[in-house]
Structure formats: structure tokens, C-alpha cells
């Protein structure tokens, strides 16, 4: 059993880890930037250490500062949360060098899935379906045009070290290729210090469906069903749900087995997510693996009654995974509440929350780190809360979410609450007939 876990993160995920640690009888250490000195994760942890100035590079991405905090507080494990250093193989390696357990996969496992070209090659060897595309990184725009002609337009250029839509461009015809190629490389280099890009066939009208998995050091892997993440803007998820309204029992079984193959191919030890694109004919293709806990893990927890953070900690302690494959027994929907103005192209809206009333009632869970009087800093991700509704059916979950959103009051900053209120009343969303392009035809009223 770990005695003390340092949480190398901030906001709601830091609070989420603190809660599970407290239930397990484990002490927690919060780290924080000067911008986060009044954050709730600092208040509720057993100890707290300031690790630097507001900029992420000076604080939450500053490995020497985080390791110093772990050493002076005698932490025996570090939980990275999501984002920041959660998928940083070097950080995982440094933790091991200091005899501090990194609560996540091994450095080699992170590396094997962190580079998308390597991950794709691994999946092909494991027999997991992948999107047709070129082998290896593109050397020049001429090669890109040749491959596009071979596979047929549209194609998509992707950064090999990327995520979150950075370094990604869809190309619909040859005349667009040169500009898209140059832009994708420049954006990849600026975002990831690696301008390598590759090309794949672009899957039209896709659903973004991911499978939650867990694996232990004894070679056992299980899946905990799927999440549909197709409601997204510029490749950033806004809503997730489980089970997917597009899913069938047969497709879930095939995708679950493929996800277990993917994790088993690298001997994966932790919780993680295999992300797939699924076309309108229910053909699915491996997209990437997230070697960490996901923002939307709460959706899976609600439909399976399974604490994924606890499972992650137990796996890191050397315990075998707790269960077999899970089927969803309820329906859950998660809306991400961001400090953004949906009437102004989702422009960020940092500032002080003057009034806050959070909804409650049967079937509602809220994971948040904000409170009345809290000032949202401009330096980090704009998500300030996740609201999750859970019910026996999808329609009931939508109705519960709609009711809860009508009670949600946040004043002082703009938020995405009005967007989600309109989404819950949208006929296409209610029917389940949508894909990742859904928001291109959505207008705020």
C-alpha cells in the first residue's frame, strides 16, 4: 500500500484523485503554481507544495520542481492525472530512478503508443484494424501527393507526436495539398517540437468511439465497454456518453476484443483507452491509445459502478485487475463545462466567478474544482466542471441532464452551459444520428 501519493496535476482531476486516495487511507500531496494557490485541490490535500510560476513550463511541466516536491514530502508514488506529464515517458523513467512509483504504464509502454507511426505498426502486427495510409513519415509534399492519389481523396495529414487536433489537416483535393502539408508540419513543430507528419485515408462521417481498458503486470487485460466522443469541436471533445447510441452487441464484442489485443500487444499495465474511428457501415479502425486516465472516465464509472482511479492505483501497487469485461448497465452522458463563450466562437472567458449554484438530485454527478469567488486563471485548459447524468435509458439520461443544466448557475464568466442546453433539445442528437461533423451544422440560437 502506498502511504503518500503526490498528484502532479491541478483542477478537478487532482480533486478526483484526492477523494479516492482518502477512501483508500492514502495521504495526498498537492502541487500548485502561484496562480492556483486558492484552488480546492490545494485546500483538500493533506500537504501542498508550490512548484512555480503560473506558466505550465514553470510549474506543472517542470519535472525537477515536481521531483523535489516529492522528495521533501517523502512521497512514494506520483499520480499524473491527465494532460501535462501524464504521457511523458521521461517523467515516468525519472520517477523510477528516484524509487517513486509512477501510477501509470511503464516508460516503454508510453513510448510505444506515444508515437503514432510506431503505434500503428504495432497494431498491424497485433491484427487490429487500422486506417489505410502510408508507411512511416512523409519526406516531402511530392510523396504526400503520390500517396493521396493511391488511396484517393480525401486524406488527412497528422502529426506523429500530436494530439488535440494539432498538426492535423484534411485535404480534399490535390490543389490543397501543398498548403496543408506546410501548415501541418509548422503546427506540429511548434506544438510538439517534432514536425514529423504522416498521411491516412480520411474516414468520412465517422463516429469517435473509444474502449476503456485495464491491464495488469500478470498479463490480464479487460475492457469496460465504450464511450461515444463524437460531439467535438476542432477535434476537442465537448460531450461523451456510454453506451454509444450507434453500438450493437456484436460491434461491442468485436471492438472490445480488438482493444484487448491492442493493450496486450505491449503488455499494458494500468488503465487506458483505445480510440477508434467507426464509419457509417460500422467498420472500425484504430486511431490512437491514451496511456492514462481520460477526462471522460466518469462516464464509464457511472455505467459500470467501477472506480477507475482506485483500479489504477491498485494496479500500480502490483495487484491483479479486479474484473472481467464489463457491459454497461445504465446510460450516462457527460457535458464538459468550459469557461468559453459559445455565442462568440467559444472564445475563452477566464475571470472571477461571482455566483455559483451547482445542480443536484438523483442521477447527477459533478466533478469540479471551482466555487463562488474563485478566479479562473487564463493559463490552463478552460474546462471548469464536468456534469454527468445517469439513468436507465438514454432518453432518461438526456432529460435528467436537461433538467440539471437548467439549474446550473455560473455568473461572472461565460460558459458552455447554454450550448449544452440547446444540444439536449437538438433532434439529431436526441435521435443518436450524428458523427464527428455534427457541430459543423449546429448554430447557437
Image (cartoon, rainbow, N blue to C red):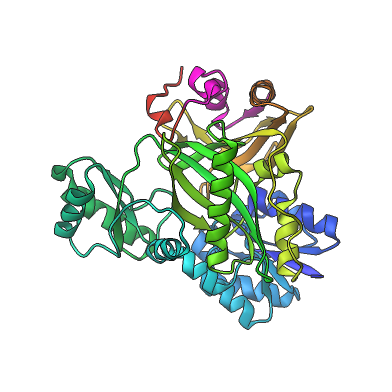
Q: Looking at the picture, how far across and down is residue 132, in whole percent?
A: 32, 52
Give whichever of 66, 289 is nearer the camera: 289
Q: Where are the magenta residues, as a range?
A: 407-433
- Where residue 270 appears, as percent x and y from the top left, is 65, 63
Q: Is residue 268 above or below residue 324?
A: below
Examine the rendering and report whether any part of residue 53 can be seen.
Answer: no
Evaluate whether residue 290 shows in this view. yes
Residue 135 among magenta residues:
no
Q: Residue 360 location in percent, x, y? A: 76, 29
Q: Which quarter of the rendering shows the N terminus?
A: bottom right
Residue at the limit of the structure toward the front, as seen here: 250
Q: Nearer the viewer, residue 67 or 210?
A: 210
Quadrant of the image occupied by residue 320 = bottom right
Residue lying at 59% horizontally and 66% vertically, measured from the top left: 268
In the image, 135: left or right of 212?
Answer: left
Q: Quadrant of residue 311?
A: bottom right
Relative vertical location of residue 290 with respect to residue 228 in this rendering, above or below: below
Image check: 295 left or right of 71?
A: left
How many badges with numbers are in the image?
Answer: 0
Q: Position of residue 164 (x, y in %)?
A: 44, 49
Residue 424 magenta-highlighted: yes
Please name whichever residue, 144 or 147, is drawn nearer the observer in this view of the structure.
147
Query: Could you say which is closer to the camera, residue 215 or residue 84?
Result: 215
Amino acid at each position: 500500500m502506498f502511504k503518500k501519493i503526490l498528484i502532479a496535476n491541478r483542477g478537478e482531476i487532482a480533486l478526483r484523485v484526492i477523494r479516492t486516495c482518502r477512501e483508500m487511507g492514502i495521504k495526498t500531496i498537492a502541487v500548485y503554481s502561484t496562480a492556483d494557490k486558492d484552488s480546492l485541490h490545494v485546500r483538500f490535500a493533506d500537504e501542498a507544495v508550490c512548484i512555480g510560476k503560473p506558466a505550465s513550463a514553470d510549474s506543472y511541466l517542470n519535472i525537477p520542481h515536481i521531483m523535489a516536491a516529492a522528495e521533501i514530502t517523502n512521497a512514494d508514488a506520483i499520480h499524473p492525472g491527465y494532460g501535462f506529464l501524464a504521457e511523458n515517458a521521461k517523467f515516468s523513467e525519472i520517477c523510477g530512478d528516484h524509487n517513486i512509483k509512477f501510477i501509470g504504464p511503464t516508460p516503454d509502454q508510453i513510448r510505444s503508443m506515444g508515437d503514432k507511426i510506431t503505434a500503428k505498426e504495432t497494431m498491424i502486427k497485433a491484427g487490429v484494424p487500422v486506417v489505410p495510409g502510408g508507411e512511416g513519415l512523409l519526406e516531402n509534399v511530392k510523396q504526400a501527393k503520390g500517396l493521396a492519389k493511391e488511396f484517393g481523396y480525401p486524406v488527412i495529414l497528422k502529426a506523429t507526436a500530436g494530439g488535440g487536433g494539432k498538426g492535423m489537416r484534411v485535404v480534399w483535393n490535390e490543389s490543397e495539398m501543398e498548403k496543408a502539408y506546410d501548415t501541418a508540419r509548422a503546427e506540429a513543430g511548434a506544438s510538439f517540437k517534432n514536425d514529423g507528419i504522416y498521411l491516412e485515408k480520411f474516414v468520412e462521417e465517422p463516429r469517435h468511439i473509444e474502449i476503456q481498458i485495464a491491464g495488469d503486470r500478470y498479463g490480464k487485460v479487460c475492457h469496460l465497454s465504450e464511450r461515444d466522443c463524437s460531439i467535438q469541436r476542432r477535434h476537442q471533445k465537448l460531450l461523451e456518453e456510454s453506451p454509444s447510441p450507434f453500438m450493437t452487441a456484436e460491434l461491442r464484442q468485436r471492438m472490445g476484443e480488438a482493444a484487448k489485443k491492442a493493450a496486450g500487444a505491449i503488455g499494458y499495465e494500468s488503465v487506458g483507452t483505445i480510440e477508434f474511428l467507426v464509419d457509417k457501415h460500422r467498420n472500425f479502425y484504430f486511431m490512437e491509445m491514451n496511456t492514462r486516465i481520460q477526462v471522460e472516465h466518469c462516464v464509464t464509472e457511472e455505467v459500470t459502478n467501477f472506480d477507475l482511479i482506485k483500479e489504477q492505483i491498485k494496479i500500480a501497487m502490483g495487484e491483479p485487475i479486479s474484473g472481467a469485461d464489463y457491459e454497461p448497465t445504465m446510460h450516462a452522458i457527460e457535458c464538459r463545462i468550459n469557461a468559453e463563450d459559445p455565442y462568440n466562437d467559444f472564445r475563452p472567458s477566464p475571470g472571477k466567478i461571482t455566483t455559483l449554484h451547482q445542480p443536484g438530485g438523483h442521477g447527477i454527478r459533478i466533478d469540479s474544482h471551482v466555487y463562488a469567488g474563485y478566479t479562473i486563471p487564463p493559463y490552463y485548459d478552460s474546462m471548469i466542471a464536468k456534469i454527468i447524468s445517469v439513468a436507465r435509458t438514454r432518453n432518461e439520461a438526456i432529460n435528467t441532464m436537461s433538467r440539471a443544466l437548467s439549474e446550473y448557475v455560473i455568473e461572472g464568466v461565460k460558459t458552455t452551459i447554454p450550448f449544452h442546453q440547446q444540444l439536449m433539445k437538438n433532434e439529431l442528437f436526441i435521435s443518436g444520428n450524428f458523427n464527428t461533423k455534427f457541430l459543423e451544422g449546429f448554430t447557437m440560437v
